[in-house]
Image (cartoon, grey):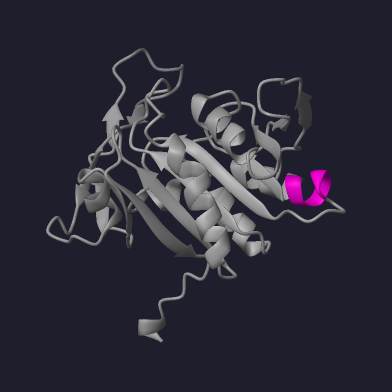
Amino acid sequence: MTIVVVNDDGWGTAGIRLLAKEMAKIGQVTVIAPDGPRSGNGAAISVVQPMYIKQVDEHDLNGAEVYTTNGTPADCVKIAREVLFANRKIDLLVSGINHGSNAAINAMYSGTIGACLVAAEKGIPAIGWSIDSHAMDVDLHWLQPFLVEITQHLLEEGIAPRTCFNINAPVGEIEGIRWTRQCAGHWEKELVPLTDELPEGVQRGFKLAGQFVNDEPAATDTDIWAMEHQLLSITPLSIDWTDYGSL
């Protein structure tokens, strides 16, 4: 089995290293990742900026080859498909492990999930993994046993065309697995004014922050509820954004 591993936190983070090692247990892994953080890129692509790739000398990933690029996570998928595997089939794309939740509306902004959506558009089965902590040293050992088990199960069941899976894990011991839907929610108070000295000619500056608001806190079938109850959340996503109820 040929497996491509990508992420949006950039090559070398704990999440992608663990994911590459675990996926190497079930297939031949090739990593293609951004050369630095690309969080919040969604499915953005490099329209103007040229893309470059560089092979990384890596000996600690169970035989996986590693490449980095100055592009986005979505670019990584395109590079894998058009360059690294121009004459070979990609059997699976896995993205992550993202440091930070991609549940609820976060999936729309996520470079981790953006890569999965691009893979789905290319006809490549794709699974995105995230953990509910932005800490680069978050304890991943509770999640580790599920990586191969769930991946193999989803492949055996079959990943439908034009779909992918968004998997979100709580921090700490995982007490079960739950199929979920995307929670309805929104971010508010997202822009915090900068108090530092601003560049010459700039009148005001802001940085992103904010807080997530769950619009349906009583619902027990959502990805947010699952993580709040120490459950691993699996949500199928589609690249078809049509609101059929409005047609």
**Is residue 100 covered in magenta?**
no
Tell me, yes or no, if residue 113 can be seen here.
no
- Residue for point 56% across, 63% down: 156
Q: Is residue 83 left or right of residue 112?
A: right
Examine the residues drawn in magenta and state their main secondary structure. helix
The quadrant of the picture occupied by the C terminus is: bottom left
The image quadrant of residue 221 is bottom left
Residue 141 against residue 124 in the figure, above or below:
above
Q: Is residue 227 left or right of residue 136?
A: left
**Is residue 84 covered in magenta?**
yes
- Residue for point 51% across, 57% down: 153
The image quadrant of residue 169 is top left
Tell me, yes or no, if residue 96 can be seen here.
yes
Farthest right residue in view: 87
- Residue for point 18% across, 57% down: 215
Farthest left residue in view: 218
Q: Nearer the viewer, residue 64 or 42?
A: 64
Residue 64 against residue 154 in the figure, above or below:
above
* Magenta region: 80-85
- Residue for point 45% across, 35% down: 144
